[in-house]
Amino acid sequence: MRIAVLRERAAGETRVAAVPETVKKIIALGHAVVVEKGAGDASSAPDAAYEAAGAAIAPGAAAALQGADLLLKVRRPSAEEIAGLRAGAGAVALMEPYGDRALAEAFAKAKVEALAMELVPRITRAQAMDALSSQSNLAGYRAVIEAAALYGRAFPMMMTAAGTVAAAKCFVMGAGVAGLQAIATARRLGAVVSATDVRPAAKEQVASLGAKFIAVEDEEFKQAETAAGYAKPMSAEYQKKQAALVAEHIAKQDVVITTALIPGRPAPALVTEAMVKAMRPGSVIVDLAVAQGGNCPLSKADEVVEVGGVKVAGFSNLPARLPADSSALYAKNLLALLPLLTDKDSKAFAPAWDDEIIKGAMLTRAGAVVHPSFAAAPAA
């Protein structure tokens, strides 16, 4: 199988879908890898490192795609990149498919078998392929680092001859993968950390990291998690009670990090303008959900907005601020998926159509949109 790895062209994207370490392993499995020139430059992976691993370097995207059986990318392919693939070839990336049926239809029209990494089922067997978790983990870490850089004071308590510096109070909203890593990182930096989440299971996880759990723990709270482990949308009544509790708590915080996302839906609004204005000057809010509308209505993508002395930062792609590690983990996610896309004997591109992981991630097959979330409803 001939595998193409292209340079990412999305604004601000520094990651790459394969690193020299994984390229070497892919070639050892019997495949050929073609990397577009400069694809790994922003991730500290020069062309020479890919060549040393056994990859061929193509001068441009068109040359890399010529004769390719499988395209590996971080972000969704462009129309030109899709057109460069032959019918029957595969494409794997973080497709961001929700709300964009046109993308799936473009793949179907080109007869390209497209898989979305964010749709890989969150089951035990697929943990090594879980790109959402690998990237969110680094995003949670980086969010705290960005907050510390914006915050005009120290995070840990410091006792000096000149006086004592109080520890920063950090509040993490959403205790999924990103939130838990943010909690752990803020604790390592010496902050006093608290966190909230609507999922009951999160309480124990938050406590295990040494943070205080903040939530209205009524009957609705006890039923607020889907079978897949995601948060359910909460009732207006619960949101009102939780908002009152959170508003009181946020007013006392120095740093707030919001991470709440629901797949396929706009990000829930958690931090209102009134809450922001109640914080003391010099405080910082980092909104990880800004790409899906934001958890704070004041946040703007890739900007730091100042409101009454409070800095509201919206980082739409935090993993791209750690390109070497983010690329290495994402490349390993793709490497783990590769056996399910390959015929064991011939090494040809041949997805295991009946496998639940492939079924969960597959957007298109044989010229049709097949994922139930994006396929057209049958005629009445």
Image (tube, rainbow, N blue to C red):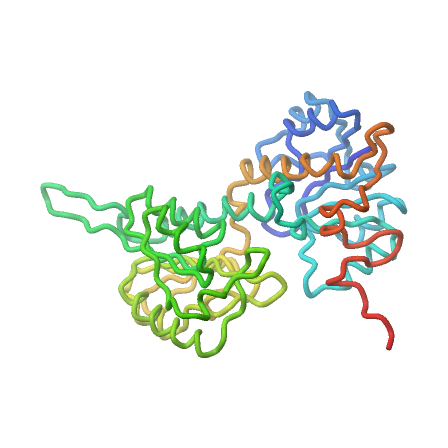
Q: Position of residue 177 (x, y in %)?
A: 49, 49
375 to 126, vertically: above or below: below
Does 22 appear above or below 298? above
Q: Is residue 59 left or right of residue 262?
A: right
Q: Could you tell me if residue 80 is visible in this image?
A: yes
Residue drawn 38% across the image and 44% down it: 185
Count the marks.
Answer: 0
Can residue 313 be seen?
no
Quarter of the image that includes the C terminus:
bottom right
Quarter of the image where one finds residue 328 = top right
Give the image location of residue 61, x and y in percent.
78, 41
Residue furthest toward the left?
161
Q: Nearer the viewer, residue 203 or 167?
A: 203
Residue located 78% across and 35% down the image: 3
Residue pictured at 80% horizontal, 51% vertical:
80
Left or right placement of residue 170 versus residue 374 in this view: left
Where's the N terminus, which quadrant?
top right
**Which of 140 and 129 lies nearest the eye of the viewer?**
129
Q: Residue, x 60% and y 41% (percent of image)? A: 127
For this view, does 122 lie left or right of residue 83? left
Residue 291 appears at what percent x and percent y? Answer: 56, 60
Where residue 40 sits: x, y (%)? 64, 35
Q: Quarter-wise, where is residue 109 in the image?
A: bottom right
Task: In the rendered view, tell whether residue 282 sits above or below residue 275.
Answer: above
In front: 368, or 231? 231
Residue furthest top as drawn: 52
